[in-house]
Image (spheres, rainbow, N blue to C red):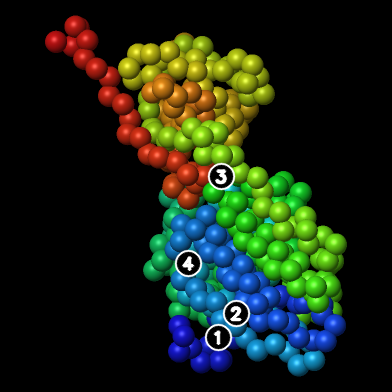
């Protein structure tokens, strides 16, 4: 991509503007390098956290405008399919809207009719017949179904990624916390943002910062110290146990059909080792079916679950059912893909379904 011509770059990229309000229209090299590197780390963290490090992009420094110091970093994106797949999940849509202020439908509308057709075609090819994409289900978009050579597709995906990066740099700390950027593996992006404002704080000539080419500087110097603070992280020995994910079949001995009452009285069942287990069902689509009485309930219900749990002294605890796959033999959904699991849990480990040990009656 480094050999791309100027017209190719303009057609396939988006610019991340960093506008410094300085007295004499110049910036020290140290400040420029540190802020540009921090912006690059924000993009790296977004790619690793939300797109499974699958984005094929290049960050290019463009010359500043005459008479001001406007740092322009060009994001040239060659792999748009991962972006469109991400924003068309419930998890991805929530993060995109939280960071950019625009829902996925607003993005596709603003990107134009032809571009919308590319996305719709890719999603139509990826969906299973007669299956509704709801809950946290991820749409697997085949790369071949979305032409990566399309300038419009590349530029549209770059616009979304740049808007997310700008949101991380621009939003108040409380807004980022509300979005959930300080949970799981996402603090890497917030740490990079803190480095950005630490660089601005160290340069006394920087009065304000903005992220548009206009003379609009919403971040005053007085807010640099707060933004330069990295979110506290627990010492290693105080970190909660790691999450494990597995798919298991459970038969229910004591259900709780009141979604809001689960914290008080959890579901109870027997796992494949015939041991008692307690769990909470978080799957929104499952509760939607419960609400509209779309499930065939029996005396002892059998569930096939994708759940997450932590382990202390070899014993599972804090079981969270992320997706109900089958209910009494009826298929309800497919398992959540790795990117959705990472968005919910952060780092996790896969664990295969446990096979029950033979008893005397099995001999």
Q: Nearer the viewer, residue 141 or 132?
A: 141
Q: Which residue is mark 3?
A: 184
Residue 188 placement (x, y as % from top left): 57, 55
Q: Which residue is mark 2?
A: 74
Look at 32% across and 17% down and name the residue there. 273
Q: CA distance from mark 2 to mark 4?
A: 15 Å
Label 3 vs label 4, nearer the camera: 3
Number of residues whose C-alpha sits closer than 10 Å to that of mark 3, classed few (under 14), some (14–19) or many (20 or more) = some
Check disc 3 and report its element: helix, strand or loop: loop
Q: Which residue is mark 4?
A: 55
Q: Do tag 2 and tag 4 residues touch (Cβ < 8 Å)?
A: no
Look at 60% across and 51% down and name the residue there. 187
Q: In the image, is residue 149 above or below residue 5? A: above
Residue 212 placement (x, y as % from top left): 76, 75
Q: Give me the disc on residue 279.
A: none
Q: CA distance from mark 3 to mark 1?
A: 34 Å
Check disc 2 and report its element: helix, strand or loop: strand
Q: CA distance from mark 3 to mark 4?
A: 21 Å
Q: Earlier in the sequence, mark 3 or mark 1?
A: 1
Check disc 4 and report its element: helix, strand or loop: loop
Q: Earlier in the sequence, mark 3 or mark 4?
A: 4
Q: Do tag 2 and tag 1 residues touch (Cβ < 8 Å)?
A: yes
Q: Do tag 3 and tag 1 residues touch (Cβ < 8 Å)?
A: no
Number of residues whose C-alpha sits closer than 10 Å to that of mark 2, classed few (under 14), some (14–19) or many (20 or more) = many
Q: Earlier in the sequence, mark 2 or mark 4?
A: 4
Q: In the image, is residue 133 above or below residue 151? A: above
Q: Which residue is mark 1?
A: 9
């Amino acid at each position: 991509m480094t050999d791309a011509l100027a017209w190719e770059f303009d057609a396939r990229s988006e610019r991340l503007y960093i506008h410094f309000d300085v007295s004499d229209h110049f910036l020290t090299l140290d400040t420029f390098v540190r802020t540009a590197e921090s912006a690059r780390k924000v993009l790296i963290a977004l790619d690793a956290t939300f797109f499974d490090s699958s984005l094929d992009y290049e960050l290019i420094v463009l010359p500043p405008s005459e008479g001001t110091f406007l740092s322009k970093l060009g994001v040239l994106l060659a792999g748009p399919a991962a972006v469109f797949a991400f924003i068309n999940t419930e998890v991805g849509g929530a993060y995109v809207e939280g960071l950019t202020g625009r829902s996925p439908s607003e993005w596709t509308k603003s990107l134009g009719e032809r571009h919308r057709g590319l996305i719709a075609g890719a999603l139509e090819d990826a969906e299973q017949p007669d299956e509704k994409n709801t809950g946290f289900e991820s749409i697997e978009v085949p790369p071949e179904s979305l032409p990566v050579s399309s300038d419009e597709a590349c530029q549209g995906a770059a616009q979304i990624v740049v808007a997310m990066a700008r949101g991380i740099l621009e939003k108040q700390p409380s807004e980022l916390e509300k979005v959930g950027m300080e949970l799981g593996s996402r603090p890497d992006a917030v740490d990079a943002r803190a480095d950005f404002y630490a660089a601005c704080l160290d340069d006394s000539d920087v009065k304000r910062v903005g992220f548009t080419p206009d003379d609009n500087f919403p971040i005053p110097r007085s807010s640099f110290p707060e933004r330069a603070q990295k979110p506290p992280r627990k010492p290693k020995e105080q970190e909660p146990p790691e999450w494990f994910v597995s798919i298991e079949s459970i038969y229910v001995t004591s259900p709780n059909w009141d979604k809001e009452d689960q914290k008080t009285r959890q579901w109870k069942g027997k796992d494949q080792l015939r041991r008692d287990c307690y769990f909470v069902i978080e799957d929104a689509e499952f509760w939607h079916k419960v609400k509209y009485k779309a499930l065939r309930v029996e005396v002892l219900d059998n569930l096939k679950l994708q759940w997450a749990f932590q382990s202390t002294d070899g014993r599972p605890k804090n079981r969270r059912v992320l997706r109900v796959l089958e209910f009494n033999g009826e298929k309800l959904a497919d398992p959540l893909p790795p990117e959705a699991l990472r968005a919910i849990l952060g780092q996790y480990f896969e664990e295969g379904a446990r096979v029950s040990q033979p008893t005397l009656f099995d001999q």
